[in-house]
Amino acid sequence: MGLFDKVFGGEKGTSEKKENKVPWNPLTEISQLDELEKLSEGKTVAIFKHSTTCGISRMVLKNFEADYEQQLNDSVDLYFLDLKAHRDISNGIADKFSVRHESPQMVVLKNREVVHHSSHQAISADKLKELA
């Protein structure tokens, strides 16, 4: 079950539902930002910033999860940030990586630097695959 369905409940009345296995890691502590920066030296790190009260953010998350390909699991670590619960971390991302806050937003790190960031409908699993 994808994160969207865990947070908002699955679709009712669907007999054949594709099981999506996006390996989200929760981003819940500001101290994780230093860890993610270091991790990006050897692996692509992507942070998905999501607002649980925004319909557009919900749609973008659902589309990303539907398009995500399992092959990326070995080359990308995905982190999920709930903006409502952890706005301080979003502010920390903006400060540490010099990326203006948007929601929804994906920030991609490689070798301790932001190599891509996008928001709203520009967030794409295909773009992440290019960067991996």
Image (cartoon, rainbow, N blue to C red):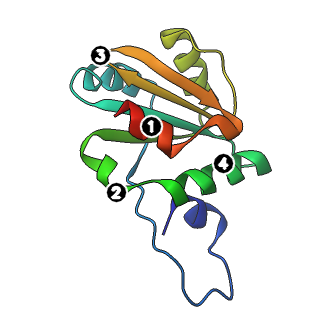
Report which residue position mark 4 lands on.
60
Q: CA distance from mark 4 to mark 1?
A: 14 Å
Identified at 66% across, 48% down, the residue is: 60
**Label 3: few (<14), some (14–19) or many (≥20) C-alpha neighbours in 10 Å:** some
Q: Position of residue 84 (x, y in %)?
A: 68, 39
In this rendering, the label closer to the viewer, 1 or 3? 1
Of the two numbered discs 1 and 3 on the same chain, state the one appearing first in sequence. Answer: 3
- The C terminus is located in which quarter? top left
Report which residue position mark 2 lands on.
70
Task: Indicate whether 129 appears above or below 62.
Answer: above
Numbered tag placed on residue 111 in the rendering: 3
Q: Secondary structure at mark 3?
A: loop
Q: Amino acid at mark 1?
A: Leu
Numbered tag placed on residue 128 in the rendering: 1
Task: Give residue 113's quadrant in the image.
Answer: top left
Q: Decide if residue 132 is in sight here.
A: yes
Residue lying furthest left in this view? 42
